[in-house]
Image (cartoon, grey):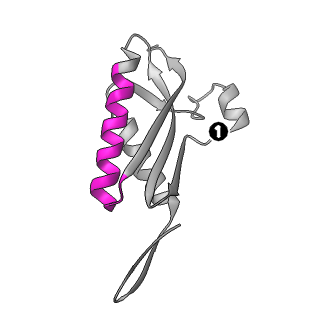
Amino acid sequence: MIQYKNHLGTISVSNRVFERLAQNAAVNCFGVAGMAGETEPGRLSLLAIRKPRAVTVTVKDNALWVDLHVLMAYGVNISAIVQSIVNKVSYQLESATGIPVKEVNVYVDGLRTAE
């Protein structure tokens, strides 16, 4: 929970809001096939069994620290896509909240092929 205080009172924003903003920014990047823990209908995923958090946003020293677990599309340049995710997530969070993003960590948990 992040709290803003001003002369009118206090505004509290849940971490889930920041997580949702980061997730939407990441999934809309070219080459991202989904977030970790998502399964396709009729398929069982080992990642889904242990249920990892696809997005974690932490607040330290008045800055945001973001961890993303993504699935990439097969055949894309992973390092270029990861850099795109870092830039887009940082920009989206900073422009929506006004809070600086200190670090964005992207973990590629798997690849998806087109079937």
Instruction: Using the image, determine if residue 26 lies above or below residue 3.
Output: above
Which residue is identified by label 1? 52
What residue span does the magenta drawing correspond to? 80-100
Seen at 60% across and 35% down, the residue is 37
Rendered residue at 56%/33% (across/down) = 36
**94 within the magenta span:** yes
Percent across and percent down for residue 27 are: 39, 36
Give me the residue at 44% from left, 61% from top: 62
On the image, the x and y values in percent for residue 16 come to 51, 58
- Secondary structure at badge 1 equals loop
Vertical placement of residue 72 versus 29, above or below:
above
Magenta stretch, main secondary structure class: helix
Pinpoint residue 82: horizontal percent, then vertical percent: 39, 27
Is 28 on the left or on the right of 38, as rendered? left
Query: For the residue marked with disc 1, what is the amino acid?
Result: Pro
- Note whether 76 is above or below 32 in the view shown: above
Nearest the viewer among 19 and 99 is 99
Q: Is residue 81 magenta-colored?
A: yes
Question: Going by the image, does 24 lie left or right of 41?
Answer: left
Residue for point 36% across, 14% down = 77
Mark 1 closeness class: few <14, some 14–19, many ≥20 residues within 10 Å: some
Q: What percent of the width, then of the height, locates residue 108?
A: 52, 25
Residue found farthest to the bottom:
8
